[in-house]
Amino acid sequence: MAEDARPSLLISHKNQKMDGKIESVQVFGRKKNATAVAYCKRGHGLIKVNGTPIELVEPEILRVKTYEPVLLLGQQRFANVDIRIRVKGGGHTAQIYAIRQAIAKSIVAYYQKYVDEASKKEIKDILLAYDRTLLVADPRRCEAKKFGGSSARARFQKSYLVYYLRVFALSMQYKSASCAMAVTGKRGVGIPTILLHDGEGTIVSIEMKTGETYRGLLDETEDNMNCVMKEAVRTDINGNTTQVEQVYLRGSQILFICTLKHAPMFKRVKMWKKHKGSIPTLGQGGVGGGAPRGQAAAIIRKGK
């Protein structure tokens, strides 16, 4: 029986080589900004990192960390595979942890695809029992730097006085928003942009820094001056008009917000103007103050 079985094994092996199929899998391991891509195929037990044998991986003090999958599973499980790893990004320590994860994931994927599910489950259980990060990426990342300081520590925030508008009350109907701004530019007073919410549902005109003008229904506003308009008419710098059903405008690109004097927002603006001396501004306790984002201005005109 043994003699009859041998030719069948040789024939199957020959057919596999004739088909040109290579038993291989490709996986990746990550740690912070380091990424290691492992290519595992049938071979003779070679493990190389960026073309260098794993026995020469630097730094030497962390080299044993890359051996952990082999030490846990035994060299017999790696005897019939070759693993080639390319790693880049991150620091030395992050690359070492990305390499060990790539090795562990590659041997699990290879056994799952080309050996059997029982062997794969046994390997996976051994690795997870020792260290879960051998198969599961660590989601932790470096804390992002915050504005207002040189480190990643949090800064004191004021949510209700972060953004400002310069609001101008005009008693006469304006002809050009840019001309009116030039004439009355010194009459501004700083107020929180939360007053914009009172103007929702009214007809406004918004002039952008690019020269475009939008006139329509102010549907929704945000504290950072981002606006959503519906049924608006867009006028470009050449005077051409187009009808848009809905448009989203970024607050940093807004130059003017023009509304009628009888709009709900105007009553609160007048109240702010009466108590002009006690209006707080960003970073100081006096009056005035411009918008730190976009230097936007709202011009309130008298209705017909």
Image (cartoon, rainbow, N blue to C red):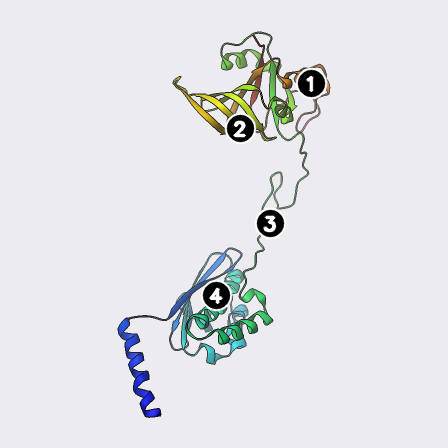
Q: Quadrant of the C terminus?
A: top right
- Which residue lies under the disc numbered 2? 228
Identity, as a three-letter code, of the amino acid under mark 4: Ala
**Mark 3 or 2, closer to the camera:** 2
Callouts 1 and 3 close, C-beta under 8 Å: no
Give the spatial CA distance, label 1 vs label 2.
25 Å
Count neighbours of disc 1 (C-alpha within 10 A) and say few if under 14, some if 14 to 19, many if 20 or more. Answer: some
Q: Residue at x 43, y 22 (%)?
A: 243
- Which residue lies under the disc numbered 3? 143
Give the spatial CA distance, label 4 vs label 3.
25 Å
Give the spatial CA distance, label 3 vs label 2.
33 Å
- Which residue lies under the disc numbered 4? 102
Count neighbours of disc 3 (C-alpha within 10 A) and say few if under 14, some if 14 to 19, many if 20 or more. Answer: few
Mark sitting earlier along the chain (4/1) = 4
Callouts 4 and 3 close, C-beta under 8 Å: no
Mark sitting earlier along the chain (2/4) = 4
The relative height of residue 239 versus residue 24 in the rendered view (above or below) is: above
Give the spatial CA distance, label 1 vs label 3.
40 Å
Picture coordinates of residue 75, whole percent (x, y):
48, 79
